[in-house]
Image (spheres, grey):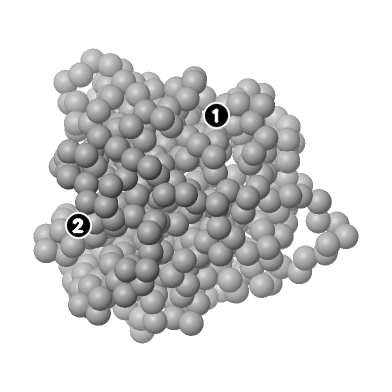
Amino acid sequence: MNSRPLLLAKIMTKQELLQTARETLEANWRAPGFSVPSGRLYPFQWNWDSGFTSIGNAHINPQRALREMETLFTGQWANGMVPHIIFHSEKETTYFPNFDFWDTTVNAGAPQRPKTSGITQPAVHGFVLEHLLNTFPDDAATIATVKALFPRVVNSHRFLYIYRDPEREGLMFMYHPWETGRDNSPLWDASMDRIVIDKGTLPAYTRQDTKIAAADERPTADQYDRYVHQLELGKRNGYDGPGIFAESEILIQDTLMNALLIKSNASLIRIGQRFGFDVGELEEWQQQSTRAFQQKLWHEELQTFVPYDVRAGAQIAEREIGSFTALSAGIASDKQAKILNDYLQSLHDRGFYLCPSFDPDSPHFDSRRYWRGPIWPHMNWLIHDGLKNYGFGKMAEVVRNDAIHLIREFGFYEYFDCQKNTAPDLTQGYGGDQFSWTAACLIDLIET
Ligand code: DGY
């Protein structure tokens, strides 16, 4: 169960906040050179968590920021995939599903060590590398690491374009909600409902997460059965076989995953141009992806970007946080950007903290449960970045200040309630505490 960290006083000064953020990142650093997202709930290296953590660490420990990315890529597969978890310790038993359950020996290109999961996560690495390079443009160690990782990051994008875009549309698909980072978003409900669970064939398992975080802040038991079902589907197909596209009931071209891929493509193109690397392949992907994103993922009626359910052959008509990542990736037209900005303004005017992870007016909204409503600091980081780029400075400041306010009031948690009228009854945030990307994004939001 959560407990309020002793370190937190009710009102922390900016310096105290930064100090606690530094202590959080220090406490979460592990051999051989990475940050756990949160020591008890997520005791290994998570892919996109590491990216955001590097961005924060760059301000206080640049060497660690670089090391974090290098360590992540020690888990890269021969097919280019960067897995969503790298199990640097094989002795840690407080997480499910651990490396033995994933059993990546089904794919000859998976590294024997470190052990990893068999699915991926949003492609943040290109823009993280560019962020590090922009922060230290003349630093020899940064330049060397960026140059060494560049081809590996390009190869991770190639994996997505080859294995996750079999019809060559320019949009990658995901088949496991954990890949999107937004595990239990209502976006995936209809696809999840298509899965028929046969308890007789589903392997037995014991959840660990609900022993550490409150059960009503986490995905449900039915959702976990479906996560395990999808894991087994991946495993049966060697985690990259064509059977995934042929069989999976969950087959979705997600907004956030494709937007961050496009954002990272753009970063890689700029990095490549600086160092004289060939960027032709990246430019082709980028052109096709940007066009396909615009054509397929804008929902005319809702006036927002939405994921596309490939299995159902239809857009998923919901307002949700992934839409706003199109700003950070520079995909939205000026008109679309204004519509998204105005929507955020309307939520702000109605007394919500920004940015709720799911439409507060939807019957599926749940202000406590993980990705069905709460606010996530790294999403505020991305949306702040996007709003600024389109010149919406006022709303960018609201998004930045809300993240800082929530962390200051409720601690360095994983996620937070978005309802201002609920806040007076709360003493802490939700999910895991002493959270790395919460600390890291706070540092960057304060320092830049
Ligand atoms: C979890 O364990 O909740 C993660 O989100 C899956 O990666």
Few, some or many residues within 10 Å of mark 1 (<14, 14–19, 20+)? many
Question: Disc 1 and disc 2: Cα gap in Å?
Answer: 36 Å
- Horizontal relation, residue 138 to residue 320: left or right: left
Residue drawn at x 28%, y 16% as measured from the top left: 141
Residue 111 position within the rendered picture, expressed as x and y whole percent measured from the top left: 63, 26
Q: Which residue is mark 2?
A: 401
Q: Which numbered disc covers residue 75?
A: 1
- Horizontal relation, residue 350 to residue 118: left or right: left
Residue drawn at x 20%, y 77% as measured from the top left: 349
Please state which of residues 151 and 44 is positioned toward the viewer in this rendering. Answer: 44
Amino acid type at circle 2 is: Asn
Asked which secondary structure carries label 2, the reply is helix
Question: Dividing the image into 4 quarters, which one contains the C terminus?
Answer: top left
Amino acid type at circle 1 is: Gly
Instruction: Please indicate, yes or no, whether residue 5 appears anywhere in the rendered image.
Output: yes
As displayed, is residue 299 above or below residue 249?
below
Please state which of residues 57 and 172 is positioned toward the viewer in this rendering. Answer: 57
Residue 431 position within the rendered picture, expressed as x and y whole percent measured from the top left: 48, 53
Please state which of residues 59 and 263 is positioned toward the viewer in this rendering. Answer: 59
Instruction: Please indicate, yes or no, whether residue 283 appears anywhere in the rendered image.
Output: no
Residue 93, image quadrant: top right
Residue 54 position within the rendered picture, expressed as x and y whole percent measured from the top left: 34, 33
Residue drawn at x 41%, y 30% as measured from the top left: 27
* Foreground label between 1 and 2: 2
Residue drawn at x 24%, y 42% as measured from the top left: 17
As displayed, is residue 386 above or below residue 323?
above
Residue 223 position within the rendered picture, expressed as x and y whole percent measured from the top left: 65, 63
- Horizontal relation, residue 29 to residue 309: left or right: left
Q: Residue furthest top?
A: 140
Please state which of residues 106 and 62 is positioned toward the viewer in this rendering. Answer: 62
As displayed, is residue 379 above or below residue 344?
above
